[in-house]
Image (cartoon, helix red, strand yellow):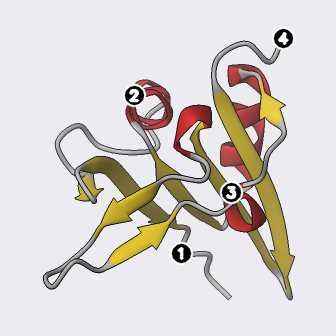
């Protein structure tokens, strides 16, 4: 069921499987970044609009070569699953944020 409050979009770029996921209520929000009143929009184009279950998000994270995660619930799930080490996430506009890159030997 997709009631967990996550949205996700998968982007395929060449050999990359990019998972962008965030807490659903963040889509469309303007987050402050840097100085001088600059903001960044949490874009539905990037993060998606389709709600997904925790199982679907975990399935995608297991396959991701790159992941961009934004929000308290998304980060908590990624930490519980061992994808993000506790205390290693930063913030974007005061919202927990992490990026994951899989280093695959060639």
Q: Alpha-carbon distance for marks 3 and 4?
A: 19 Å
Circle 3 residue: 47
Secondary structure, mark 2, is: helix
**Residue 18, horizontal then vertical, whole percent:** 71, 67
Q: Alpha-carbon distance for marks 4 and 1?
A: 31 Å
Q: Which badge, 4 or 1, is on the more N-terminal residue?
A: 4
Q: Which badge, 2 or 1, is on the more N-terminal residue?
A: 2
Q: Is residue 29 above or below residue 23?
A: below
- Give the left or right position of residue 58, taking residue 9 as reference: left
Q: Toward the viewer: 40 or 82?
A: 40
- Front position among marks 4 and 1: 4
Circle 2 residue: 76
Density class for disc 1 (Cα within 10 Å; few <14, some 14-19, many ≥20) is few
Name the quadrant containing residue 86. top left
The residue at the far front in this view is 37
Q: Alpha-carbon distance for marks 4 and 2?
A: 18 Å
**Residue 4, horizontal then vertical, whole percent:** 65, 16
Determine the residue positioned at 42% across, 24% down.
Answer: 80
- Tell me the quarter of the image containing the C terminus: bottom right
**Residue 42, horizontal then vertical, whole percent:** 55, 60
Circle 1 residue: 103
Determine the residue positioned at 26% across, 73% down.
Answer: 33
- Front position among marks 3 and 1: 3
Cβ atoms under marks 3 and 4 closer than 8 Å: no
Circle 4 residue: 1
Q: Alpha-carbon distance for marks 2 and 1?
A: 23 Å
Secondary structure, mark 1, is: loop
């Amino acid at each position: 069921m997709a009631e967990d409050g996550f949205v996700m979009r998968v982007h395929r770029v060449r050999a990359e499987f990019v998972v962008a996921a965030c807490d659903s209520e963040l889509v469309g929000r303007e987050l402050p970044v840097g100085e001088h009143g600059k903001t960044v929009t949490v874009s539905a184009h990037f993060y998606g609009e389709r709600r997904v279950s925790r199982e679907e998000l975990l399935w995608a994270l297991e396959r991701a070569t790159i992941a961009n995660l934004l929000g308290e619930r998304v980060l908590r799930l990624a930490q519980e699953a061992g994808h993000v080490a506790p205390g290693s996430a930063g913030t974007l506009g005061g919202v927990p944020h992490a990026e994951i890159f899989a280093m695959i030997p060639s």
